[in-house]
Image: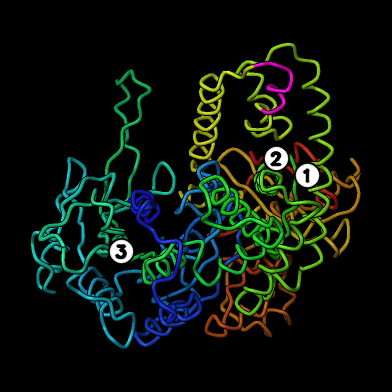
Amino acid sequence: MCLCQGLKRRQNHIKYQYTSVFMRTTEEIRKLYLEYFKSKGHTAIPSASLIPENDPSVLFTTAGMHPLVPYLLGEPHPGGNKLTSCQKCIRTGDIDEVGDATHLTFFEMLGNWGLGNVYWKKEAIEMSVEFLTSPQWLGLDKNKIAVSVFQGDEDAPFDEEAFNIWKSLGIPEKRIAKLPKKNNWWGPAGETGPCGPDTEMFYWTGDPNKIPESFNDDNVLWVEIWNDVFMQYDRQLKTKDSKQNTTEKEYEFVPLKQKNVDTGMGLERTVAVLNDCDVYLIDTFKPIIEEIEKLSGKKYGSDENTTRSMRVIADHIRAATFILGDERGILPSNVGQGYVLRRLIRRAVRHGRLLNIKGRFTGKIAGEIIQLFKNQYPELEKNNERVSGEMEKEEEKFALALEKGLKEFEKFTSVNGKIAFDLYQSYGFPLELTEELSNEKGLKVNKEEFESEFKKHQELSRTASAGAFKGGLADHSEEVIKYHTATHLLHKALREVLGEHVEQKGSNLTAERLRFDFSHPTKVTPEEIKKVEDIVNKKIQEDLPVHFEMLSVKEAKEKGAIGLFEDKYSTLGEKVKVYFIGDYSTEICGGPHVDHAGQIGKFKITKEEAVAAGIRRIKAVVT
């Protein structure tokens, strides 16, 4: 179970004010966490981009482990085999839930990893306990801690090892819950891949004189604060007997040769728990809320609707600021990541109207967010103009959409729930606005029908999100690895044909095709496409050898490597991983790749199109 689920159950108990003037700050907890794991021999690695590279399993980076998938499967990491980080994350599955006291779209995830049997359950759990309870670190009361472990099923046995470790560390047996896979199991990210049991830590947030003797994770006052995942299995498709006449897939759980520890602690929600307050009142949210109060003339916590709208605005503009401010530069559009960004901004604007905020306001709030985070994430200030400019443009476009929606509404002589939902989906009309307009015309909206349509939409969104988890680098299939290597040749060929202004802006790989986004101001002509295709195929036919080297940033630049050369690379133990395809392509990349280019097969570009202003997309296949 994730931290947000535990906190969601508790939202009616969360305070709207701080319990102490001595607030534990986000910066303090972030710094303490990284310092602790560095003292245990871990390399602190920088946050990766919010936009995953060469991975269709997610639209955005959703956890600290996602940028590390190649290393969890055996690729050597420049920082070594013990790592720690604070990763920027976006989760979009529950955007419509944002507005309660717990759900966040953007958040920071603290994590530590032991790659390849470097340490296992005993060491991981002992470090978790020390960081949580030692006065030198968080200093939490050990008597207020309870835990859960995997109870076992037909796929994998009860995690007796974790259970016994907790007992040896002084956690009473009644405070160690044995829970099923839905609570205490992680992964795989796709249909197949690394996975395993986890153990979760909970903290009592109720009356310290009334701590229950036993632990029940349904008690709203026990709040999850950390999760240690033990990747010890590889979920694989079973090989079918040729005589079997069934299309149903069967899986088996095979012990992994390389075991990994992967832990995750949501920073904002941990800070909220430590301060016993609403997550929107921690130090990195309160100034945003105060700016919204100033713009609206309303008070946070004054009533349920006002509070909900302020939370939506704060969360969505924060998430949009980080997406727009990312080095990979996603812009609002009607597809994929750009659609999520557009939806976030427009939902924030809708709630601004509910608060009667006058004029354009998203840029002002984004400016406050950039000031809060510019030291930790300097790319936000660097891309300040893009952030504010795109926010304001999207507000203008949405204002026009609302005007069109009002004209459309005037055509209706009745408004059922489906029409109300279509107005919401197409023009951004919140139900409250449709009801208000309907009342003026003496019409009544069927709320139940609207809710039914809304639930169908949510289910489709979640299904689409789940579908995105199939394939990609998460499964390291042979076909995906071929496509991954082909993107390097394509990138280089595009720069050769179109010019060195071409930079990769994103990619998406499946076992059937590659999709490659890049910067270029105009449509690529059929003649240019043919040239690019011919160059890639020529390099494949030359069967160029593929290898990687661990180089310093200076050495990589001297060798002509392309990729993101941000200052953060210098914190990776002074080394980056650079892949060479013969003497043709040199690029910073985590891997994996084929051993020689001839393994890729014949390369064919199937489509070229625009995805945003100045961003083109190529789709291609190999046979």
**Residue 95 in picture, x, y percent from top left:** 55, 45
Give the residue type at disc 3: Asp
Residue closest to the eye, 536 or 186: 186
Residue 476, image x and y in percent? 48, 51
- Disc 3 designates what residue? 228
Q: Which mark is residue 264?
A: none
The one of 37 and 217 positioned closer to us in this rendering:
217
Circle nearer the N terminus (2, 1): 2
Image coords of residue 550 (percent x, y): 56, 78
Q: Which residues fall within the magenta stretch?
A: 436-443
Which residue is rendered at x = 27% and y = 48% of the image? 183
In the image, taking residue 553 as reference, residue 382 lies left or right, namely: right
Quote the CA–CA distance across marks 2 and 1.
Answer: 8 Å
Q: Is residue 71 above or below residue 444?
A: below
Residue at 61% from the left image edge and 19% from the top image edge: 445
Q: Residues within 10 Å of mark 1 (few under 14, many from 20)?
A: some
Return the residue at label 1: 611
Mark 2 — residue? Answer: 335
| Whether residue 595 is situated above or below residue 558 in the rendered picture | above
Local SS, label 1: strand
- Mark 1 is on which residue type? Val
The C terminus sits in image quarter: top right
